Amino acid sequence: MARIVACVVLVYLGVCCNILNADENHENHDNVSDAIQKPPYKSPEPSGFAYLADNFDSEERFKDTWILSEAKKDDIDEDIAQFDGIWSIEELKKHAHDGDLGLVLKSKARHAAVSTPLIKPFYFEDKPLIVQYEVNFQDGQECGGAYLKLLTLDDNYEDLKQFHDKTPYTIMFGPDKCGNDHKLHFIFRHKNPLNGTITEKHCKKPKDSLEDYYKDKFPHLYTLIIRPDSTYQIKVDHKVLNAGSLLDDFAPPVNPPLEIEDPNDQQPEDWDDREKIPDPLAIKPDDWDEDAPAQIVDEEDVMPEGWLEEEPPMIPNTASVKPDDWDVEMDGEWEPPEIPNPKCMDAPGCGPYKQSMKKNPRYKGKWLAPLVNNPNYKGKWKPKLIHNPDYFNDEHPFRMLPIAAVGFELWSMSPDIYFDNIIVTDDEKVAKQWADDSFEIKRVKIAVETESIWSRIARFTTDHPWMWVVYVLLLAIPTILLMYCCCLSEDKTDIDEEEEKSPLRLGDDILKNAEIENLRFPNPEFGDQELAAVEVKGAEKETGIEEIIESDDKVGKKNPEEIPQETICSCKCVISS
């Protein structure tokens, strides 16, 4: 049985190895074919017009187009006010293509800012805005953001070397996390058409969990689409996580309410807003004692036997010595520290005994009249509504402030945040093709390199359906063997038990068969004499067997091992004769 199981296991291992080898050979063949047919990694190029498209594959281009901030933050310590975070152009730590580089924020717990101008300003008119870029938290994210800002076109902030946290922006978009708060920001700054004031509008939170994007250490593609009809979409890895309207899904809302509460309205003095009042007709019962204590001494509590009232629970430690540096004038008179009284160790307790307390059955507390409905109740007072003097109705919130530049202004507690393949365009097809030429190639490479053995077996089975026959056979053979072995062992056990229960029955059968043979085939050399002898011997046999049975009954049906040797020999003699 062990050999059969070992053979089945070896067959299983052989099949798995063949699958993996065949898969590897297939992959090697595909890799060779791809190496012949496909050129090495090529930096993506936009398939149409883009206000900004940067793959960060050239460190020289980065230095020429991106500007590091030299500003300082206001109202903060000088030590951390400087935007001195370190930026670098590097490959991914894992699953990198040769030549595929990205922008990496190397430093942590330091303010960092870098920005670049658009080819030309983007005006919110009749074309959508698409912003798309990759982020990879290579070391996870403890606390900090990886969002970008689309900076507002403003003559007072043209110098990007002074880019800081107060630089006006039109849109802020991207991931942000601190602790267990995972966010995907979409904030736009709206201009009041009446007075020109600017307020931030925050998008509603997506329903899907964002936690994996911060801890899986894989690149993810973040896409924001804002359309001229004031609708928006937020995607991660091409999956829509959030969508809605600029008018309905932001807080505070774009348009203020038509009516507001009158700030000058005051509640009348005779306005009674008490829904319930104490019953004025209620009278405190005569037996209600408000002064009764909540607990009283339990008179039934008796001092345990052996309680040492004269012994204090704590005594001075006679072994302690006053420190040499003890100053009486500064520290006072020295007294040895106290230790538990050793006499109290075996006693129920020491010192004056105090009876325990119990609840006072007469305690009822302060009496209060029951509450009844207030006959003068007028409801909850609210100030009257008046027309909102700041009301406006902006039906086209898409028409935001124009954009002139893109920048990262960040602070993070985790280093090595990787950014790549950023694009700002007004054509969704251009953004989609840009992702196909960059992010999708990267994602396929990662999927192949991180594929598990079971995934490879499943993929091989999908490519070769005949493997299902092999799987069925591999499951059927050990099942049949198991059933066969179980049934066979069961039958053998039954036979052994039956033989143990009737050891003499076999002897009876042998004796009867021997008699029949002698009667049917007598020896011709002997004649009638022999036949008579046989009859006599047959009678002797019967007498011997009867004796054996009787003796067995007297002993009490002994086991075969317990039958006397002489009895067994006599049986043998009878049978042989």
Image (cartoon, grey):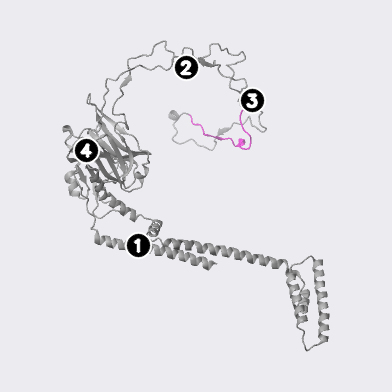
- Read off the magenta span: 333-354
Determine the secondary structure under disc 1: helix
Determine the secondary structure under disc 4: loop
Quadrant housing the C terminus: bottom right
Picture coordinates of residue 253, whole percent (x, y): 31, 29
Please give the name of the residue rendered at 53% of the width and 13% of the height, measured from the top-left corner: 279
Could you tell whether 220 is left or right of 348 in the image?
Answer: left
Could you tell whether 72 is left or right of 496 in the image?
Answer: left
Residue 335 in magenta stretch: yes
- Of residues 353 and 396, which is closer to you in this image? 396
Say whether disc 2 or disc 1 marks the residue closer to the N-terminus: 1
Please give the name of the residue rendered at 60% of the width and 20% of the height, measured from the top-left corner: 363
Say whether disc 4 or disc 3 marks the residue closer to the N-terminus: 4
Whether the residues at callouts 4 and 2 have beta carbons within 8 Å, the answer is no
Determine the secondary structure under disc 3: loop
Quick one: label 2, few (<14), some, or many (20+) residues within 10 Å? some
Residue position for label 2: 275
Residue position for label 3: 298
Residue position for label 4: 127
Q: Which mark is residue 24?
A: 1
| Amino acid under disc 4 | Lys
| Mark 4–mark 3 distance (CA, rounded to whole Å) | 86 Å
